[in-house]
Amino acid sequence: MLKKKVEKILIEQIEKEGYSSNLYLAMATWAEANGFPGIAQWLYAQAEEERLHMKKFISYIGERGSHAVIPAFKQPPVEYKDVKVLFDEVLKHEQYITESISKISSVCIDEKDFVTYNWAQWFLTEQVEEEASVRTVIDKLKMLNKDNLYMFDKDIMSLRAAAASPTA
Ligand code: FEO
């Protein structure tokens, strides 16, 4: 069985990962509605990853003999001023999730739950990759103006592939 404090913070993370997935779905629908199918595809892929993260938390809590309670999720924002603002929000959100996984690690150390500590480290590595991948997108966006956003939209999935491959 998980210790109470560890169980509580892991259950809270189910909500955070699930909200992340919904947030990126909402961003994807905004991108689609505003004529950016490539950006939408990038965000749908991101939403899928977050859903898998949520499921990893659910499975782990269950494996350790606790009850993974599924929470309500608040509604994500519907509108964004522009693509740059949207990706700035993605980065801010990922930084918040990195903080939150760091907090899980710190609770595990306080509670001497080194098994969960060890398990949670995968997420920290994942966060480093996700933040880097969003920064790459933001760096590209800084070099663009409205006229070449069309090409950026066509190309954004190749940025995702490059971020996933350390040799690229
Ligand atoms: Fe699973 Fe990127 O937070």
Image: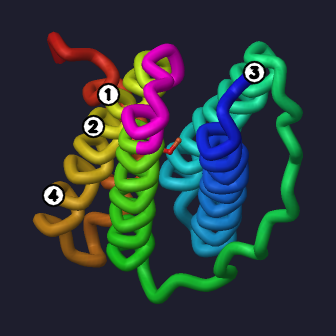
Q: Which residue is mark 2?
A: 128
In the image, residue 103 sits, relative to residue 159, either above or below, namely: below
Q: Which residue is mark 4?
A: 139
Q: Are marks 3 and 4 in contact (CB under 8 Å)?
A: no
Q: What stretch of residues is rendered in magenta?
A: 107-116
Q: Which residue is mark 1?
A: 125
Front residue of 113 and 105: 113
Q: In the rendered structure, which amino acid carries the disc numbered 1?
A: Thr
Q: Position of residue 144 (x, y in %)?
A: 18, 67
Q: Are marks 1 and 2 in contact (CB under 8 Å)?
A: yes
Disc 2 within 8 angstroms of ligand 1 (CB) = no
Near mark 4 (Cα within 10 A), the count class, few <14, some 14-19 or many ≥20, is: few
Query: Disc 2 or disc 4, which is closer to the eye?
Result: 2
What is the C-alpha distance between the residues marked 4 and 1? 21 Å
Identify which residue is drawn at 36% across, 25% down.
161
Q: Position of residue 120 (x, y in %)?
A: 46, 27
In the image, residue 71 sits, relative to residue 14, either above or below, namely: below
Q: In the rendered structure, which amino acid carries the disc numbered 2?
A: Val
Front residue of 8 and 32: 8
Residue 151 counted in the magenta span? no
Residue 113 counted in the magenta span? yes
Front residue of 140 and 102: 102
Q: Which mark is residue 1?
A: 3
In the picture, the quarter occupied by the C terminus is: top left
Does residue 18 appear in the picture of this structure? no
What is the C-alpha distance between the residues marked 3 and 4? 45 Å
Q: Secondary structure at mark 1?
A: helix
Near mark 2 (Cα within 10 A), the count class, few <14, some 14-19 or many ≥20, is: few
Q: Earlier in the sequence, mark 3 or mark 4?
A: 3
The kind of secondary structure the magenta stretch mainly shows is: helix
